[in-house]
Amino acid sequence: MAPIAYCVLLDIIVFAWSVVKVTSESPVIAAAYKAFVPGFGELTEENCMPVVHTGELLREAMAGGVGLAAFNVINLEHGEAIVEAAEELGLPAVLQVSENCVKFHRGQVRPLLAGLAAMAEASDARVSLHLDHIEEFQFLEQAMGTGVSSAMFDASKLAIAENIAATRRAVSFARTQGWHLEAELGEVGGKDGAHAPGVRTDPAEAAAFIESTGVDSLAVAVGSSHAMTAQTALLDHDLIRRIRAVVDVPLVLHGSSGVPSTELAFAIEAGMTKINIGTMLNIAFTEAVREALRAQDLVDPRKYLAPARTRTARVVREALKAISSPRTGQS
């Protein structure tokens, strides 16, 4: 190639990368480009980053009559454990980063997501990236161009009219990014809000909420509760069936760490698809760290993070088998 042509090509590549970088970090600049460049920002599942799309995994799970396990990530060791287990079993998984996790990481969405995206791309496992319980819109905007393909926007603490308005805005934004958008009609138990323990999602209200907002999936309150450390929750399987009968989007179960495996199997059979798990991983991780730290002279973090990662992967494997393996007797 002639030197001049090479230089021109290099300039084009550098300019293109600068556009991607700047627009991914600035919604205002992205909007300006979209106004003057037809089709800019209108991403689809086919041209997202090379991480599997959550929408694709959900459709496959619904078609196969199985669940899709979604695991909350706090650190890179969590991510490594989940990807390792998914790869070993050949089962899909969702890596979820919650708003609480983002705030733990000093309000920065992108660094942890970058690490998780790199893990996903380097693995044979079919995993996707998801934002969980996002209440502040800025965190959706910060995640542009990170490999995230879905988000759960949580306006459930608001009055229903405000919830609908805020969720519509999130759906509109998600469409520009090619994302799948999950939402919640009222809070799942354990968060002392609209869905305190004992409250249940009304099927008619669920159908109306989906119609009003255009969400792609819906988290429902059917008996689970966040942050449970014992598997004692009993789900309302009849309610799940009644909700499933009037809505056509995937149903999401939050607070699944407190639900026994047999209950989860019945819930999936009744119509639940995405099963969120977080506390169960934290219990395993923390127990392993405590055990390792009994050695009084231990100062190398790798000496306790490694067994914590191994213990977490073991729990993830069992959860994947319970949630995403085809049921006996199914075609």
Image (cartoon, rainbow, N blue to C red):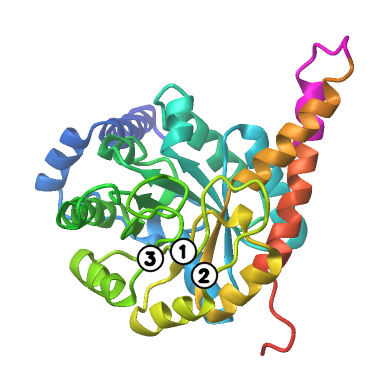
Outermost front residue = 198
Q: Secondary structure at mark 2?
A: strand
Q: Of the residues under marks 2 and 3, which one precedes in the sequence?
A: 3
Q: Secondary structure at mark 3?
A: strand
102 in relation to 155, above or below: above
What segment is highlighted magenta in the picture? 296-308
Q: Secondary structure at mark 1?
A: strand
Using the image, tell me which numbered label, if any, was put on residue 217: 3
Q: Residues within 10 Å of mark 2 (few under 14, many from 20)?
A: many
138 in relation to 329, above or below: above
Q: Residues within 10 Å of mark 1 (few under 14, many from 20)?
A: many
Asked if the residue at tag 1 contacts the one at tag 2, i.e. Cβ–Cβ closer than 8 Å, the answer is: yes
Q: Of the residues under marks 1 and 3, which one precedes in the sequence?
A: 3
Q: Of the residues under marks 2 and 1, which one precedes in the sequence?
A: 1
Q: Report how far apart the C-alphas of labels 2 and 3 lie in the structure.
A: 10 Å
Pointer 2 residue:
273
Mark 2 residue type: Thr
| Residue 12: quarter of image | top left
Asked if the residue at tag 3 contacts the one at tag 1, i.e. Cβ–Cβ closer than 8 Å, the answer is: yes
Q: Residues within 10 Å of mark 3 (few under 14, many from 20)?
A: many
Residue nearest the observer in this picture, 147 or 310:
310
Outermost left residue = 35
Quarter that holds the N terminus: top left
Asked if the residue at tag 3 contacts the one at tag 2, i.e. Cβ–Cβ closer than 8 Å, the answer is: yes
The answer to whether residue 306 is magenta is yes
Q: Which is in the foreground here, disc 1 or disc 3? A: 1
Q: Report how far apart the C-alphas of labels 2 and 1 lie in the structure.
A: 6 Å
Quarter that holds the C terminus: bottom right
Using the image, tell me which numbered label, if any, was put on residue 252: 1
Residue 50 spot, x, y in % from top left: 50, 52
Mark 3 residue type: Ser
**Count of all numbered marks drawn on residues in the image:** 3
